[in-house]
């Protein structure tokens, strides 16, 4: 069984995945990484790389990852000093008011993420990922990013020699060791975080163009996929209640940006799973002829029982003062813009909430997860 772990993106929201992994480590017990295939995008690429780097000891890898997340503050992820924030802000102002003339420095981001690079270099042994692949502890690891030049989704992967690079419509699989540059590129939230140069092109957050987030796992040979998402499936009642609380006379920019961020990070997973299910039904009708090169795939999706955006509503008061000032200028407050805040809220209280919720939600589904892991080969099917 080639069991795959797929970790979606979401900035600070990815702390929920850490809680889910903590519960999974309890379920699996001592031993190496139980997922031969690990795929991540955006902050999920960070979590996935950290697991693959310590693939010889799954509980230790999860514990290390949880400790790192629970010690995070915003200045571990992006520069929060007034000089950096004002410098970037004034650069944007000059660029927008220069009538096309080249300013001293043209900015394409709002926050400097050099602290995150330093953190990843310190906490993740990227060379160990390749060693674990070479030793057969891991079948394949993939992190996805968006090429800002071609608009293509690129999955950088390291895998056994039997796994071949792939090329599909607007998505590519490129073989090579997983590096900090690739992970930084995958996690580069558009506008907020700077693009990252990998090879000869600039890349940004993988969620922007990854319309088939299950695809890398399928190309790496997964038979069964456990997905940890970060979207809370709202009921009709919750949607109506949310609509009733909105001030129709004022739509802050933070609300618009929050919806755009949700589109980047949340909107592709469920449609891809639905596509898998539709293909499955068709394959079953055709009785899966051998010449279709298809194989049965089983999928289990873990999702938050609460809205992770709503849980961030009170976090704006904890942001560094200058950043808080800028976010309030976008309309982010305790009464609005919570979705936007949730992606940037690398605050201990918020992270702790999500880790706890992820663990509780996963423990509540432990019997379902056990059943899923013990299923026979029949189940959902898809094409890579």
Image: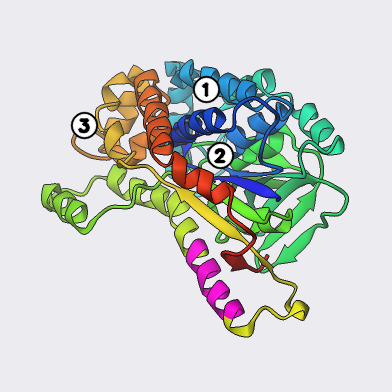
Looking at marks 3 and 2 on the same chain, the residue that comes earlier in the sequence is marked by: 2
Say whether residue 274 is visible: yes
Circle number at residue 66: 1
Give SS at disc 2: helix
Q: Residue 95 at what x, y percent from top left?
A: 48, 41
Of circles 1 and 2, the one toward us is 1
Q: Is residue 46 above or below residue 205?
A: above
- Check the image and name the residue furthest to the bottom: 286
Please tell me in which quadrant of the rendered image residue 377 appears: bottom right
Q: Which segment did they paint magenta?
A: 273-284
The Cα–Cα distance between marks 3 and 2, rounded to whole angstroms, is: 27 Å
Give SS at disc 1: helix
Looking at marks 1 and 2 on the same chain, the residue that comes earlier in the sequence is marked by: 2
The Cα–Cα distance between marks 1 and 2, rounded to whole angstroms, is: 13 Å
Residue depicted at x 74% and y 27%: 56
Residue depicted at x 69% and y 51%: 155
Q: Residue 165 at what x, y percent from top left?
A: 80, 57
Foreground: 178 or 60? 60
Foreground: 185 or 215? 215
Q: Residue 215 at what x, y percent from top left?
A: 64, 59
Q: Residue 284 at what x, y percent from top left?
A: 59, 78
Colour setup of the view: rainbow
- Queried whether the magenta region covers residue 192, the answer comes back as no
Of circles 1 and 3, the one toward us is 1
Task: Give the labeled residue for mark 2.
Answer: 44
Foreground: 235 or 110? 235
Q: Is residue 49 above or below residue 83?
A: below
Task: Give the labeled residue for mark 3.
Answer: 334
Mark 1 is surrounded, within 10 Å at the Cα level, by few (under 14), some (14 to 19) or many (20 or more) other residues, namely many
The Cα–Cα distance between marks 1 and 3, rounded to whole angstroms, is: 27 Å
Q: Characterize the magenta stretch by its predominant secondary structure.
A: helix
Q: Quadrant of the C terminus?
A: bottom right
């Amino acid at each position: 069984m080639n069991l795959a772990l797929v970790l979606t993106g979401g900035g600070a929201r990815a702390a929920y995945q850490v809680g889910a992994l903590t519960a999974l480590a309890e379920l699996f017990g001592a031993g190496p990484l139980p997922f031969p295939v690990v795929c991540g995008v955006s902050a999920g690429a960070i979590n996935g790389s950290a697991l693959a780097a310590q693939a010889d000891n799954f509980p230790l890898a999860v514990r290390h990852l949880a400790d790192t997340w629970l010690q995070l503050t915003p200045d571990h992820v992006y520069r929060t000093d007034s000089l950096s924030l004002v410098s970037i802000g004034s650069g944007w102002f000059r660029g927008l008011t220069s009538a096309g003339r080249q300013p001293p420095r043209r900015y394409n981001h709002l926050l400097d993420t050099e602290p995150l690079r330093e953190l990843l270099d310190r906490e993740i042994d990227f060379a160990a990922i390749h060693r674990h692949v070479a030793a057969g502890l891991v079948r394949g690891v993939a992190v996805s990013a968006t090429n800002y030049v071609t608009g293509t989704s690129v999955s950088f992967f390291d895998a056994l020699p039997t796994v071949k690079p792939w090329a599909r419509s607007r998505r590519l699989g490129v073989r090579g060791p997983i590096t900090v540059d690739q992970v930084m590129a995958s996690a580069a939230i558009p506008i907020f975080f700077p693009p990252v140069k990998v090879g000869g092109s600039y890349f940004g957050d993988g969620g922007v163009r990854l319309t088939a987030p299950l695809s890398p796992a399928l190309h790496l040979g997964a038979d069964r996929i456990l997905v940890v998402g970060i979207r809370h499936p709202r009921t009709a009642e919750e949607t109506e209640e949310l609509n009733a609380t909105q001030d129709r006379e004022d739509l802050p920019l933070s609300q618009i940006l929050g919806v755009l961020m949700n589109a980047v990070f949340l909107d592709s997973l469920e449609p891809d799973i639905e596509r898998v299910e539709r293909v499955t039904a068709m394959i079953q009708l055709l009785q899966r002829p051998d010449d279709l090169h298809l194989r049965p795939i089983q999928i289990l999706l873990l999702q938050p029982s609460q809205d992770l955006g709503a849980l961030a509503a009170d976090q704006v008061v904890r942001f560094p003062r200058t950043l808080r000032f800028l976010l309030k200028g976008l309309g982010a407050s305790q009464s609005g813009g919570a979705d936007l805040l949730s992606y940037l809220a690398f605050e201990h209280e918020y992270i702790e909430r999500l880790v706890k919720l992820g663990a509780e939600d996963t423990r509540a589904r432990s019997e379902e997860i056990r059943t899923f892991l013990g299923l026979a080969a029949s189940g959902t099917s898809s094409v890579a």
